[in-house]
Amino acid sequence: MTREDTESVGESLEPAEITERFNELEAGDTVTVNNHELTYDVIDTDTYSVIATDPFGQQVTFSQNLQSGGWTMSETVFDVEHTSG
């Protein structure tokens, strides 16, 4: 997803804001990313990653790139919303 694509979907958060939101998560929390309707249930966190499962039971790892500070999964993360927990 390019920067232009993210702008059409919504505002992109700065990497530091995304890191702050991921740091607030704990096991049992539910999150969404990049304005998708799909939610993820957090099962584990550490300093540079969050491991979660999607509604279909697939495990997903959100990881921080230590050089850029950005976060990725199968796409660049530009928004994180804590929805419950």
Image (cartoon, helix red, strand yellow):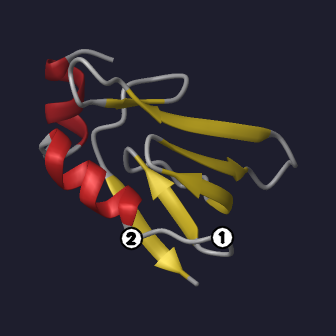
In the rendered view, tell whether residue 54 sits above or below residue 58: below
| Residue type indicated by callout 1 | Ala
In the rendered view, tell whether residue 46 sits above or below residue 21: above
Residue 13 percent coordinates (x, y): 16, 47
Picture disc at residue 12: none
Quarter of the picture containing the N terminus is top left
Q: Which residue is mark 1?
A: 27
The residue under the point 58% across, 84% down is 85
Observer able to see residue 13: no
Residue 7 percent coordinates (x, y): 14, 33
The residue under the point 48% across, 75% down is 83
Observer able to see residue 1: yes
Asked if residue 54 lies left or right of residue 70, the reply is right
- Between 63 and 7, the one lying in front of the other is 63
Residue 77 percent coordinates (x, y): 36, 36
Element under disc 1: loop
Q: Which residue is mark 2?
A: 24
